[in-house]
Amino acid sequence: MNKRNALRLMAAGAGWVGVGATLGLGLAACSETKQSFNAVDITGADYAKDFSLKDADGKVRTLADFKGKLVVLFFGYAQCPDVCPTTMTEMAQVKQQLGKDGDKLQVLFITVDPARDTPEVLKAYMGAFDPSFVALIPTADELAAVAKDYKVYYKKVDGKTPTSYSMDHSAASYVYDTHGRLRLYARYGAGVAPMVSDLKTLLAS
């Protein structure tokens, strides 16, 4: 093989390497756009997009009020014996484990028991977990509407007395990114570490 042909083959080889490298970079870029979460990724879902409800101070709140923060939204009630306090305790731990990014997390609690969950009750309830957590108190009609929009189940279960009833309700949480977009559906009982990991992933995106 003469020198000219050898140079041509080397150039052709370099061209293929260049194309391969370009394709490799393209594939890497594509793979990086797909984030991996512990919770169920519901990005782009056409429900649970917003709400307009009063907080314990009587101020009407919407998702836009918390733009720039990650939002974790949960439906529950103050007299809940297990699921609700467990979830709120875990969210307080999540905020702590986020460290300096804890201030970028906003936990919202929509009561499914507005008859008993007065502003005073919910202020004390949120304060028992973290003073930054915000409780929202819908009217009966607002609760029906927001529960339908969020695909949340709730039902009153009679107790021994008229005021000792309990509430069956959905136990998952909705997670929004810092732009107010619905991203994740976190099932009850998943644990603190998976939530912390998911929130860090959203903050890094």
Image: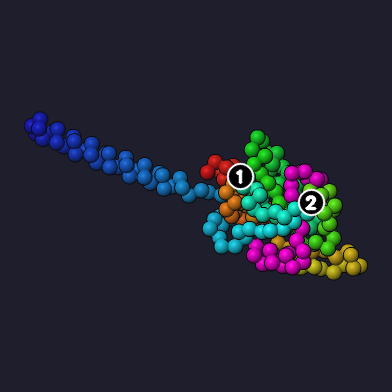
Q: Residue 179 placed where, x, y %?
A: 57, 49
Relative placement, left or right, of 84 versus 102 is: right
SS assignment at label 1? loop
Which residue was labeled with disc 2? 57
Going from N to C along the chain, the mark reached first, 1 or 2, is 2
Highlighted magenta segment, given as a residue range: 127-152
User: Considering the numbered disc 2 on the image, is that residue within a helix, a strand or a loop?
Assistant: loop
Q: Which residue is nearer to you in this view: 182 or 11? A: 182
Left or right of 102 in this view: 124: right
Q: What amino acid is found at the position of numbered circle 1 in the picture?
A: Gly
Where is residue 150? Give x, y as percent.
Answer: 65, 62
- Name the residue carrying label 1: 68
Residue situated in front as seen by the camera: 115 or 96? 115
Left/right of residue 23 with respect to residue 163 in the rendered view: left
Among the 4 quarters of the image, the one containing residue 8: top left
Magenta region includes residue 142: yes
The amino acid at mark 2 is: Asp
Q: Mark 1 and mark 2: span between their CA atoms?
A: 22 Å
- Residue 124's place in the image compared with 77, above or below, is above
Q: Residue at x 69, y 41 (%)?
A: 95
Task: Please state the horizontal and vertical placement of residue 90, each as a whole percent of the image.
Answer: 72, 46
Question: Image point 80% across, 68% down: which residue?
Answer: 156
The residue sitting at 56% across, 57% down in the picture is 42
Q: Residue 118 in magenta?
A: no
Question: Where does residue 147 sit, x and y in percent of width and height?
Answer: 69, 64
